[in-house]
Amino acid sequence: MKEHLQQLLPRLVLAPSFALVLIFVYAFIIYTGYLSFTDSRLLPSYGWVGLENYEKLFKLRHWNIALKNLAIFGILYIIISTFLGLLLAILLDQKIRGEGFIRPIYLYPMALSFIVTGTAWKWFLDPGIGIEHSLHLWGWESFHFNWIKDRNFAIYTVVIAAVWQSSGFVMAMFLAALRGVDSEMIKAAQIDGASGFQIYRRIIIPLMRPVFLSAFVVLAHLAIKAYDLVIALTNAGPGNATQLPSTFMYSYTFTRNQMGIGASSAIIMMIMMFSIIIPYLYGELKTGDSK
Amino acid sequence: MIFLNFIKTTLAISALTLSTTILTSIANANSDVEVMHWWTSGGEAAAIKVLQKDLASKDVNWKDMPVAGGGGSDAMTVLRARITAGNPPTAAQMLGFDITDWAKSTGKLGNLNAVAEKEDWDKVVPAALQKFSKYEGKWIAAPVNVHSSNWVWVNKKALDDAGGKAPTTWEELLTVLDKMKANGITPLAHGGQPWQDATLFDAVVLSMGDDFYKKAMIDLDPETLGGETMVKAFERMAALRSYVDDNFSGRDWSLASSMVIEGKAGMQMMGDWAKGEFIKADKKPGEDFVCIRFPGTQGAVTFNSDQFVMFDVGDQSEAQMKMASAVMNPVFQSAFNVVKGSAPARTDVPNDAFDDCGKKAMADLAEASKNNRLFGSMAHGHAVPASIKNAIYDVVTAHFNGEFDSKTAAEELEAAVFASK
């Protein structure tokens, strides 16, 4: 009897969360998928229209802007955050004094919500009140930095704010990995006469391949999900210059009463997300098995 | 096998959990009205209190359900959830085509005909407003106010410095703007948000003629949308853009108003909710600022109107009728609109309590209604449904930010409207 109970207990404890996830995640994914094939406008409705929403979606100039912006934002954000994070981690790994003080300074931005980051950077970058204004007051009259008001450059300000937020976190990931490198190997390399740069370039960085992968997956899904940052920073403007798929999805589903098209854009975003996560999970599970 | 067992157990347990948490519907007292609205800022909240007190004196208990967010897009999202869950509020604040869209897609709206007939709403509410308040011959909403969007708010001192004569034509407007520029202030205070760009566009299109506005913004005639006159309208937009300062993107309309109040800018083209900002700053109409119609549109009005849409709530309908009647009461309409800065939705309200701009708004509204020159505002969702409205926004704002030249913009406008129909 007792054994039976013990066997049952984990299931009992897990059951509610399992059921909740089943309904509120997977069931709603299926529901959204279904809605993307219907003529839903203001409220969900169930007239089947096949792939019409997807056809309309890819003809929309708006959606193409959103995809292009996501490409610019995603690529720059991932590359710069990874590079900066690695650089900071390597510098911190030089056994400097006060590391315990410096590390949290870089890490703290991650503790902020994207709304706070977005609002703060909106003020920093605003030519009327931010950096440009301050430098003018200090006498540097010719200083000019109005990217956030320029439709061709606004998307890069989103990259700046996002990198500021995330690179500290990436640094922490790399730092943990650096600390895990076998010191015997480094010593051996030193004896063979390798310079510091060579040790990082040839030994340590290649050893950190799995961390690069994890960093990529974390950053990539943050990039696709990015919504609050853009809303706070530029509100998808000037014009529609910083529209991303996530802001597109919200505006079409909820303010433009085109729920069908909104749902189809959500499904496309999910496919993007899965195409990053699934290979990663697959790889993880496989290495897990081999152990 | 173990996994299957797991699922079985899980399902059984979750069924149990769910059955215990089924919500029992809470029976509302008959005298409650639950009202959803987005009037949360200072003046507006004060205005809604007037209605609450009035209803309290009639034994109707007001259950407030404010959802902050200008324009009500957040409120509409909440409303969507409530309706889908089968639990609509008694009444909800709504605008223009939203009302029609909701009426079409839910069919769960109340019927106010009894009280409307008794109080003769048909006679006192302008026909253009009734188009939204009625659906299939039934009164479904009680209109609270009429805002009009083709206003220009001018700083009196800046105007005096620029010659002192309020512009009445497009050419005169350009002259005044040029002089203001020469005087070293920003001639036009504007916030670069799509709806503000569209508000400007409303007035500019209307200034090209009533027929043109009606054909383009209400009938959505493709040839008019992509035609020569539309190219000219976009050229006017580009001209206005040249009088706006460089730091305009994303600025809130109220910040643009304070630029005019402080004399840093000459004028703002904005609906009459902007007046509230001037009044709050202790400025007097006629002395500190001047309210004029967008040059070339005197006599015509593009309006938007806040209405309380009533939902079908069964046995609560008595309280609902009381509320509808209270909303349409001339005393309330006057008290509310004096505070809100708009004109009353019924044309027989005495104008004693209103300031000069308010009196002008009421006179203009009555005149426009009489001469059939009262048009729904495109920018504020009273000319076309939300999907088309936003498609027009996209083009207008892209052009205003320099993405299209005027000719391309007209072509894009025609295409965008067609695609979103």
Image (cartoon, grey):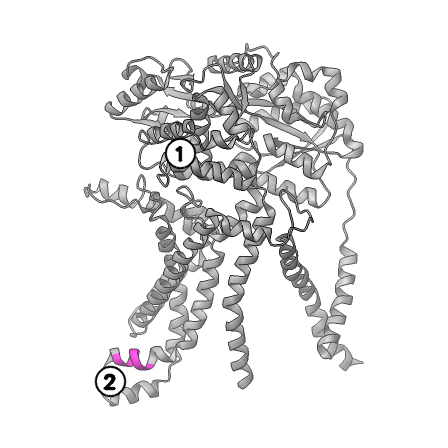
Query: How many residues crowd around disc 2 within 10 Å: few (fewer than 14), some, or many (20 or more)?
Result: some
Quarter residue A257 falls in: top right
Mark 1 belongs to chain: B
Residue A221: image location, x then y, percent: 48, 62
Q: Nearer the viewer, residue B350 or A153?
A: A153
Q: Is residue B220 above or below residue A222?
A: above
Tag 1: Cα neighbours inside 10 Å, few (<14), some, or many (≥20)?
Answer: many
Reply yes or no: does residue A236 show up in magenta. no
Against B148, is A35 above or below?
below
The chief SS type of the magenta part is helix
Point out the stretch of residues depicted in magenta: A198-203
Classify the position of the C terminus of chain B by image quarter.
top right
Residue B313 location, quadrant? top right
Q: At which x and y percent is residue B151? A: 45, 21
Which image quadrant: the N terminus of chain B?
A: bottom right
Q: Nearer the viewer, residue A252 or A97?
A: A252
- Asked which secondary structure carries label 1, the reply is loop
Instruction: Tell me the residue at 38%/63% (across/down).
Output: A168
Q: Is residue A199 magenta?
A: yes
Badge 2 element: loop
Q: Is residue A131 left or right of residue A222?
A: left
How many labels, in total? Answer: 2
> What residue type is disc 1 on?
Gly
Question: Tag 2, which chain?
Answer: A
Residue identified by numbered label 2: A194
Res B6 quadrant in image: bottom right
Between A258 and B263, the one nearer to me in the picture: A258
Residue position marked by numbered label 1 in the rendering: B191
Amino acid at circle 2: Ala
